[in-house]
Image: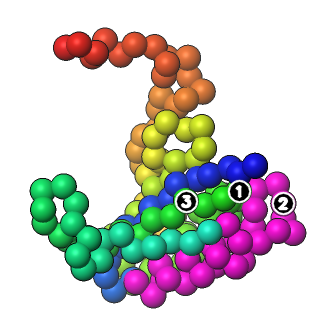
Amino acid sequence: MSWVANVMVSADASDWQNVEALSDWLRGQAPRRYQADALGVGSLRLITGPGNTWGGGKSPECEVWAGALNHADLDALRARFAATPWQRPNAVQLLITDQEEAFFRLWMIRHGELRQYAPLQPSEADDAFHEDDGLRGA
């Protein structure tokens, strides 16, 4: 059985080596959720490289890496991300959606600290999250 977390990292092109180091850590050293002795949860791959067009027929003008991680200890991932010596820390973004979550959480480094920026609420644990928002059929 697997437990998948979808992860994306957006970073300045000058930080590609840091993202590759993070990917290597995920591949061979990252702890697994509830299995501290098991290491390795997946890796990241550049999804905005040459020839990688998105809707609209243009190539993206950003650097984004993505991966589907298996049984990842997301607290350890966030700690590793925050401790990385980024060249441009204000430009890096970490987006995570854990299995059974409905949307990505956005994490950014500000004033040397990793903070969640959006969305903060409602979360899937809130009763109001599953209520009709009144926008359907509008």
Q: Nearer the viewer, residue 66 or 86?
A: 66
Q: Nearer the viewer, residue 132 or 46?
A: 46
Q: Label 2 to label 3, Cα distance in Å? A: 18 Å
Any part of residue 110 in sight = no
Q: Are marks 2 and 1 in contact (CB under 8 Å)?
A: yes
First-in-chain label (2 vs 1): 2
Q: Nearer the viewer, residue 72 or 56?
A: 56
Provide residue 98's location: percent of width, then percent of height: 58, 47
Circle 3 packing at 10 Å, graded few (<14), some (14-19), many (20+), is many
101 horizontally vs 14: left or right:
right
- Mark 1 lies on residue: 71
x 62%, y 65%: residue: 77
Provide residue 47's location: percent of width, then percent of height: 36, 69
Q: Are marks 3 and 1 in contact (CB under 8 Å)?
A: no
Q: What amino acid is at disc 3?
A: Ala
x 46%, y 40%: residue: 103
Q: Which mark is residue 68?
A: 3
Figure colour scheme: rainbow
61 horizontally vs 76: left or right:
left
Q: Nearer the viewer, residue 100 or 82?
A: 100
Q: What amino acid is at disc 2?
A: Gln
What range of the chain is rendered magenta?
A: 16-41
Any part of residue 56 in sight = yes
Judge whether 124 appears above or below 14 on screen: above
Q: Label 2 to label 1, Cα distance in Å? A: 9 Å
Judge whether 43 appears above or below 120 on screen: below
User: Which of the 4 image quarters holds residue 127?
Assistant: top right
- Mark 2 lies on residue: 35
83 horizontally vs 19: left or right:
right
Q: What amino acid is at disc 1?
A: His
Q: Secondary structure at mark 3?
A: strand
Q: Secondary structure at mark 1?
A: loop
